[in-house]
Amino acid sequence: METRTSQLLGRLSESATIAMSRKARELRAAGRDIISLSLGEPDFDTPDPIKAAGMKAIEDNFTHYPPVPGYVEVREAICEKLQRDNGLDYSPNQIVISTGAKHSLMNVVLSLVDDGDEVILPAPYWVSYADMTNLAGGKVVAVETGIEQDFKMTAEQLRSALTDRTRIVMVNSPNNPSGSVYTEGEMAALADVLREHPHAIAISDEIYEYINFTEAHASLAAQPGMMERTVTVNGVSKGFAMTGWRIGYIAAPHWVAAACTKLQGQFTSGASGISQKATEHAMHGGGVLASEMKAAFLKRRDLMVNGLKAINGLEVNIPQGAFYIFPDVSALFGRRHAGGSIQSGQDLAMYLLEAADVATVGGDAFGSPNCIRISYAASEEQLTEALRRIARAVDALST
């Protein structure tokens, strides 16, 4: 029997975050005391009122095929949320609900990108953006940022990267993996450049909107003239600790929403009706439902920032959102350990896993090999112990 897989599959790499999580689970199953700081999942449970809405949906028999883009009343609730929180006036037929924000993003990329089209990704970028682009036959154009500019793309960098082949510009704020948050002024500057290139569509990934320590979330679509050429992607996984409910959504120009509905109709059809009804309650509740979790993340952020700054060789900025820290570790490059030397963030991540029993993710997968991503979606006790282990392992490296 021939075991050949498609060339399309060959364009994809395994998600680095999922791979590291799997490796950590394997070591834990073998008896190792692994502290996993690799996955982007809140360590909180879904708020009780949202769970109650899901249970009521079962009782009310929302267990049949839903419409492909989602129930109208849920899309109306999303429209109300966008108006209330973002000042954006959408109609329900501009909303498409999907099986997680990752699914929403894939729908948009496959609907817009043809072979050879360019997709601008400010680096560091979420690991799946590049593979989504590759799957669609597009070309990744990475715009390198660094810790000295708080890992945010400037308007000048965007202008230099745009060409006649640019189809998508990806903006992610609050950002995974850096935790950086674009200000209103920074969004306005990006919008000024984008308006000069009407062939380019912006995707604004706002999945971490409710975990924003600045208290001032800026939506790209809210900038003058940008709503008709921006696809806003959001969902319930991060802000409401609903990762397992698998609900994401887009708010988009009518023609993009129609394209994504057509595509989704052949892939998955509608997302779980039970999860949608829980999402409807979450949309009405908004950021209030996420407030306690956000306060806990802020406290943990400060714990991690202070602890990591005390470790020689790590350069740390102060992330303003999400639940990640993205230290620059290039000062450790060239240092040695029993199994080899540190030449990249990925090398350091593997060393910390083996020598410190702490799982992180190398920045290579995010387009920034000088860094590692550390998730602080763990208890303060675990984080304190992880800091102790990381410090000891780094101190053990020889020059």
Image (cartoon, grey):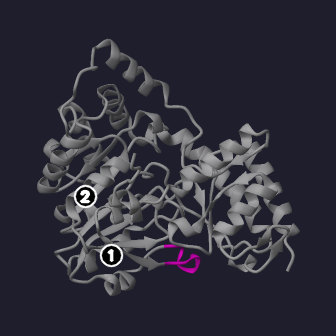
Task: State whether residue 215 appears in this view.
Answer: yes
Instruction: Note whether 240 is above or below 383 in the view shown.
Output: above
Mark whose residue sits in front, 1 or 2: 2
Instruction: Using the image, tell me which numbered label, if any, was put on residue 116.
Output: none
Front in this rendered view, residue 333 or 182: 333
**Left or right of 56 in this view: 397:** right
Q: Which residues are magenta?
A: 145-151
Q: Which quadrant holds residue 91?
A: top left
Q: Which residue is mark 2?
A: 110
Dot 2 lies on which element? helix
Dot 1 lies on which element? helix
Which residue is rendered at x = 58% and y = 45% of the image?
A: 295
Front in this rendered view, residue 280 or 270: 270
Instruction: Note whether 36 is above or below 74 in the view shown.
Output: below
The amino acid marked with disc number 2 is Leu
Q: Pinpoint residue 362: horizontal percent, then vertical percent.
A: 62, 64
Q: Which residue is mark 1?
A: 190
Q: Pinpoint residue 275: horizontal percent, then vertical percent.
A: 35, 30
